[in-house]
């Protein structure tokens, strides 16, 4: 297999683009796709500082790497969810990445903000774990951006993430999620930072290959709470479709963004105001994050296990689905 660009030995075949690249040309392709996405979707201007939400995984660290290389002014934001070894190891990866590039990393701990880490929050609220976690992450991302003077937050969502979210929302015909699914969430209130997803046209396999070829040390295990998530089944279904018809994920997502989303967006109007307690945006009087923190506070005296303790740490190995996917991308590179 030959590189389409230089004719040298290719290390990765991209069936949906009907092409293959050597290591150097693949890295250029990846950077170009990311920066072109930023330009075409008007995500960022050249001199606009951007806060990059990093989880320690391949996608967000690959994104930060591309933005740093391209000369953007960035800081990383790591949100410590307090999820046992997963959080300890992912935080260490982010700190090492930042230290190795002399980049600024802001760390915010959910336990300090809400009163307990995500595993303990899960025990005191009726919300599904990922819903409480997602709410906390969105809130902290926005507040950290405003507190530190960033008007925009970038996340590492890739094509597989976005296509799986779209499939889930479509299966439920969740019109408000469909209206909000976009790679650029524009601000509709002065207290909101713009949210952008510059990797949304690159697949999980491509970000794994980029991180591997760049020597980025990222955490391959997924969060233990990801086990059994419906988004994983949606990704598997889409992977099967992609196998028989390369390009399916991209045409599903891009077709939606171009042709269908404007119709859902038209019916969506939300009246935002400021939370009476914290000043962040909400549709009611007190925001969902403040209510969550209240629930945790009320539960603290009743809890048998001190909130914030790691006594409930699971003994099962962390799910290795991410590892399997990444190894297959890496072994393709080795084998070729
Ligand atoms: S939402 Fe759920 Fe993730 Fe939070 S609890 Fe883990 S799996 S980290 S993307
Ligand atoms: Zn609030």
Image (spheres, rainbow, N blue to C red):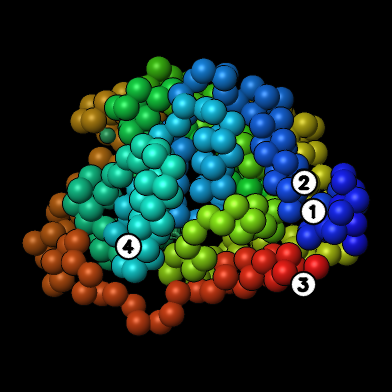
Q: Are marks 1 and 2 in contact (CB under 8 Å)?
A: yes
Residue 232 in the figure: left or right of residue 33:
left
Pinpoint residue 78: horizontal percent, then vertical percent: 37, 46
Marks 4/3: CA–CA distance? 33 Å
Of callouts 3 and 2, the N-terminal one:
2
Pinpoint residue 139: horizontal percent, then vertical percent: 36, 38
Badge 1, how many Cα within 10 Å: few under 14, some, many 20+? many
Tell me the element at label 1. Answer: loop
Q: Are marks 4 and 3 in contact (CB under 8 Å)?
A: no
Number of the label disc, if any, that sits on residue 314: none
Q: Which residue, given by chain and number where applicable, does mark 1 sit on?
A: 22
Beta carbon at label 4 within 8 Å of ligand 1: no
Q: Which residue, given by chain and number where applicable, does mark 3 sit on?
A: 335
Pinpoint residue 238: horizontal percent, then vertical percent: 74, 60
Q: Which residue is painted at 19% across and 61% down in the image? A: 308
Which quarter of the rendered picture does the C terminus lie within?
bottom right
Tell me the element at label 2. Answer: helix
Pick whichever, 228 or 96, lies toward us: 96
Pick whichever, 236 or 108, lies toward us: 108
Pick whichever, 39 or 96, lies toward us: 96
Marks 1/3: CA–CA distance? 13 Å
- Judge depth for marks 4 and 3 and give the one in front: 3
Instruction: Please indicate, yes or no, whether residue 75 appears anywhere in the rendered image.
Output: yes
Q: Are marks 2 and 4 in contact (CB under 8 Å)?
A: no
Pinpoint residue 6: horizontal percent, then vertical percent: 87, 46
Badge 2, how many Cα within 10 Å: few under 14, some, many 20+? some
Q: Which residue, given by chain and number where applicable, does mark 4 sit on?
A: 88
Number of the label disc, if any, that sits on residue 25: 2
Marks 1/4: CA–CA distance? 35 Å
Q: Image quarter for residue 113?
A: top left
Ligand 1 position by quadrant: bottom left
């Amino acid at each position: 297999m030959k590189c389409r660009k230089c004719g040298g030995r290719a290390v990765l075949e991209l069936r949906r683009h009907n092409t293959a690249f050597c290591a150097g040309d693949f890295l250029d392709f990846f950077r170009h796709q990311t920066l072109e996405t930023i330009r075409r979707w008007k995500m960022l201007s050249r001199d606009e500082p951007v806060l990059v939400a990093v989880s320690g995984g391949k996608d967000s660290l690959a994104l930060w790497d591309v933005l740093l290389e391209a000369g953007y002014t960035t800081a990383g934001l790591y949100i410590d969810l307090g999820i046992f070894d997963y959080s300890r190891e992912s935080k260490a990866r982010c700190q090492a990445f930042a230290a190795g590039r002399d980049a600024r990393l802001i760390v915010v701990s959910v336990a300090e903000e809400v009163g307990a880490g995500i595993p303990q929050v899960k025990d005191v609220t009726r919300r599904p774990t990922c819903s409480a976690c997602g709410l906390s992450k969105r809130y902290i991302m926005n507040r950290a951006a405003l507190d530190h003077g960033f008007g925009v937050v970038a996340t590492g969502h890739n094509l597989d993430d976005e296509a799986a979210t779209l499939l889930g929302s479509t299966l439920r015909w969740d019109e408000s999620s469909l209206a909000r699914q976009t790679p650029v969430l524009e601000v509709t209130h002065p207290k909101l930072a713009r949210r952008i997803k510059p990797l949304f046209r690159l697949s999980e396999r491509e970000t794994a290959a980029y991180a591997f070829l760049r020597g980025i040390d990222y955490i391959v295990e997924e969060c233990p709470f990801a086990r059994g998530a419906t988004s994983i089944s949606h990704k598997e279904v889409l992977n099967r479709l992609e196998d028989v018809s390369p390009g399916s994920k991209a045409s599903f997502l891009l077709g939606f963004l171009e042709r269908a989303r404007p119709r859902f967006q038209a019916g969506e109007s939300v009246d935002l105001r400021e939370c009476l307690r914290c000043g962040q945006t909400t549709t009611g009087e007190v925001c969902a994050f403040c209510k969550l923190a209240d629930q945790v506070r009320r539960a603290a005296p009743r809890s048998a296990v001190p909130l914030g303790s790691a006594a409930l740490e699971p003994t099962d190995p962390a799910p290795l689905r991410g590892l399997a996917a990444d190894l297959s991308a890496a072994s393709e590179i080795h084998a070729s």
